[in-house]
Image (cartoon, grey):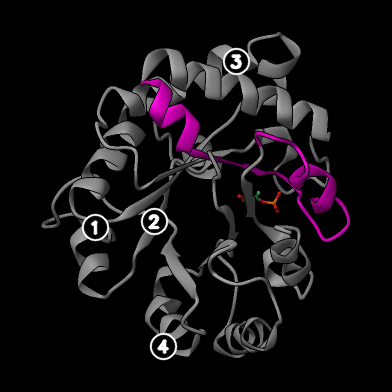
Amino acid sequence: MARKFFVGGNWKCNGTTEEVKKIVTTLNEAEVPSEDVVEVVVSPPFVFLPFVKSLLRPDFHVAAQNCWVRKGGAFTGEVSAEMLVNLGIPWVILGHSERRALLNESNEFVGDKVAYALSQGLKVIACIGETLEQRESGSTMAVVAAQTKAIAEKVTNWDNVVLAYEPVWAIGTGKVATPAQAQEVHCELRKWVHDNVGAEVAAKVRIIYGGSVNGANCKELAGQPDVDGFLVGGASLKPEFVDIIKSAT
Ligand code: PEP
């Protein structure tokens, strides 16, 4: 089954109004494959979301980098899924390793967030991935399976979920997984989904790779059969993000 290539840009906690305008101008002027071939979603910080949405070309979409686990209310500093829907923000990134590590987001909490965001009509980029210590101790697949299981236990419809495999040791480090390493985990993960969720979901769920993807290494990674796209951090702030989008073809 053909899975549409997906390229997400996670801008993290970066940008000024001027910088954001510059990035959007580069994206708007880029010649890239059509929306039928590649789905492009950029994720600015919350404060820039409506601004970016209003400036961005219509074939590219926006994502929030997080949202609250339940209905909004007395949760100072949080942004609810309902608010994102109200603003016409279609996507949200959940379970990013920086939030898991720095803000102690557990597998269960991320699973709850994914389920709630989906229930409100958001599409979710759900991040999973092992630390270097976990990889070196041989537990990569056990870690990734436990993170996916916590999501799978609470999600019944996977149509609006993209799984982002992001080995923590490759995020922002310049150490990219080799195409073989990425393919190995993506293939195992798809098998896990096949065995624990179902054959149909396994065939159609997009599993994207994140971790130091750039204009130079994207093409070979994109050539792997189970790599359905990328979640890009640092390079999504630079013009080379356009080259990464082009790696779809
Ligand atoms: C990320 O933060 O999701 C990421 C993959 O970052 P980087 O591309 O900078 O490693």
Asked whether 169 falls inside the magenta stretch, the response is no
Mark 4 burial class by Cα count in 10 Å: few <14, some 14-19, many 20+:
few
Q: Which mark is residue 54?
A: 4
Is disc 1's CB within 8 Å of ligand 1?
no
What is the distance, in whole Å, between disc 3 and disc 4 at their CAs? 40 Å
Q: Which of the two labelled residues, at mark 1 and mark 4, occupies the earlier sequence position?
A: 4
Residue 179 horizontal side relative to residue 92, left or right? right
Rendering coords of residue 165 (x, y %) = 59, 36
Is disc 3's CB within 8 Å of ligand 1?
no
Q: Amino acid at mark 3?
A: Met
State the residue position of label 3: 141
**SS at mark 1 in the image:** helix
Rendering coords of residue 106 (x, y %) = 39, 28
**SS at mark 4 in the image:** helix
What is the distance, in whole Å, between disc 3 and disc 1 at their CAs? 30 Å
Residue sitting at 73 percent across and 31 percent down?
A: 182
State the residue position of label 1: 81
* Residues at marks 2 and 1 touching, judged by CB atoms closer than 8 Å: yes
Frontmost residue, 5 versus 242: 5
